[in-house]
Amino acid sequence: MEQLLSFKKERILIGQGKVAKVYLWNGFAYKCFRGDYPDDWIEYEMRIQDTINQLDLPTVKYYPSEIPHSIKMDYIEGISLADKVCQEKYERGFEDFFSLFLKIHENAVIDLPRLNPYLLQEISKLDIDNSQKTLATKYISDISDGDVLCHLDYHFLNLMYSDNGYYIIDWINAKIGNPIYDFARTYVIIYEYANRLSKKYLNIVKECCGFDLLDLKKAIYVMAVYRLSEDNSGKIKPDTLMNNLQL
């Protein structure tokens, strides 16, 4: 009880999301979840991170937390790549971004859930027009499966930069599958939140990855439909996105 009281008194808020707030305390970061957030989801995130930390990737270590309903992790004293680009006018942001993206995909089969069954399940539950579900399901069957590590929430805010270099954070969505979906997922995120950069991003993907362009278009549609399972704000309209897509 005394430790918890000290934590509540001394902690410093350093980040906040939909389901958790992140505090700095005693040299570590503590991700403290909402009271209604299930304990087994916290345990799942711990297992995913433990699996990722066994790979040759710049990641953050997680630890059992002495604070209830939280995850304890290494504190990174630095800034996101988004802030490095915007605030410091760093000009090699996309180069660094893609270098680490490709490094993620150097990792093959590991003990993580598979992406295709997950996508099919989540899309089947959506309250959307059946034509969108049918088309997304067809596209998933059209694209060859894979055995590659996919981050599936890779964007400029999930790359942290410190004096020791970059760290890739927030692996909760990680799955095993075809990396084309990872690039497609990131495109949808950039399209939604930094639209003016989406064309530049897509041009780099086309140049460096060698994907079949029709498969890339299909993967983007799948991930735009899947995005509806996470956000009902109306920002993402899969058909409109596809009409504006230039490949």
Image (cartoon, rainbow, N blue to C red):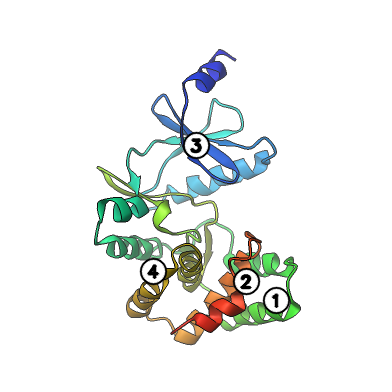
Tag 1 and tag 4, C-beta contact below 8 Å: no
Quadrant location of residue 209?
bottom left
User: Is residue 101 visible in this depiction of the protein?
Assistant: yes
Q: Name the residue at 57% across, 70% down.
A: 223
Residue at x 25%, y 62% (from the top left corner): 92
Residue lying farthest top? 2
Mark 3 element type:
strand
Residue at the disc numbered 2: 225
Q: Position of residue 82 (x, y in %)?
A: 36, 54
Q: Which residue sits at x=26%, y=51%?
A: 88
Compared to 221, does 46 lie above or below?
A: above
Rendered image: mark on residue 197: 4
Q: Circle 2 sits in a helix, a strand or a loop, which is it?
A: helix
x then y, percent, for residue 238: 60, 75
Question: Could you tell me how far apart the alpha carbons at marks 2 and 1 are, in whole angstroms?
Answer: 8 Å
Q: Kindly state the secondary structure of the residue where label 1 is placed.
A: helix
Q: Nearer the viewer, mark 2 or mark 4?
A: 4
Q: Which mark is residue 207?
A: none
Task: Specify few, some or many for label 2: CA neighbours under 10 Å numbering under 14, 14-19, or 20 or more.
Answer: many
Counting residues from the N terminus, which is met first, the one under dot 3 or under dot 4? Answer: 3
Residue that numbered label 1 is attached to: 133
* SS class, disc 4: helix
Which residue carries the number 3 mark? 22
Q: CA distance from mark 3 to mark 1?
A: 36 Å
Upstream in sequence: badge 2 or badge 1? 1
- Number of numbered discs overlaid on the protein picture: 4
